[in-house]
Amino acid sequence: MIGRDDKCTFQIIDPQISRHHLQVKLNSETNGHLAIDFTSANGVFLNGKRIEAETPLANGDLIQLGNTSIIYSVDDDPDAQTYTQLLRKHFEDRFETQLAD
């Protein structure tokens, strides 16, 4: 679960994100992951398109929640650094999420 609530697996402090915004779950049939909008007010966008139902995720997909962008990456993708650099350059004027211990 991804959202603003402190009980979410990944908490993101973004006023445009719902307390429980996005669920990512394993599809046991394909061994891949699915993105599920958890009835959020502002929606979940995958590669620029709003998702309405369980949607399969592919390596490198751009997930947008409120003012936050997440890149879905499988395992230790060799392109992970490239994705991160591209996002930082594109969104450099926005605030960054900070991780707490």
Image (spheres, grey):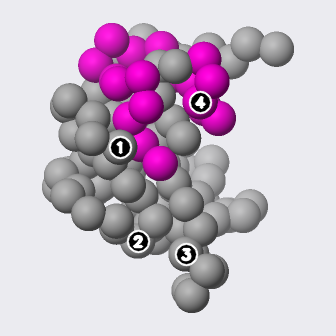
Sequence-earlier tag: 3 or 4: 4
Q: Is residue 89 magenta?
A: no
Residue numbers of the magenta segment: 6-23
Marks 3 and 1 sit apart, C-alpha to C-alpha, by 17 Å
Q: Residue at x 59, y 68 (%)?
A: 26
- Look at label 1 and name its amino acid: Phe
Residue located farthest toward the bottom when viewing the structure as drawn: 29
The residue identified by callout 1 is: 38
Marks 4 and 2 sit apart, C-alpha to C-alpha, by 21 Å
39 over 61 or under it: above or below: above
Q: Residues within 10 Å of mark 2 (few under 14, many from 20)?
A: some
Count of numbered marks: 4
The residue identified by callout 2 is: 56
The residue identified by callout 4 is: 8
Sequence-earlier tag: 2 or 1: 1
Q: Residue at x 61, y 80 (%)?
A: 28
75 over 41 or under it: above or below: below
Marks 2 and 1 sit apart, C-alpha to C-alpha, by 15 Å
Residue in the foreground of this view, choosing between 89 and 16: 16
Q: Residue 98: percent from the left, percent from the top?
A: 62, 14
Residue 93 shows in the view: no
The answer to whether residue 51 is left or right of residue 37 is left
The residue identified by callout 3 is: 27
Q: Residue 67: percent from the left, percent from the top?
A: 31, 24
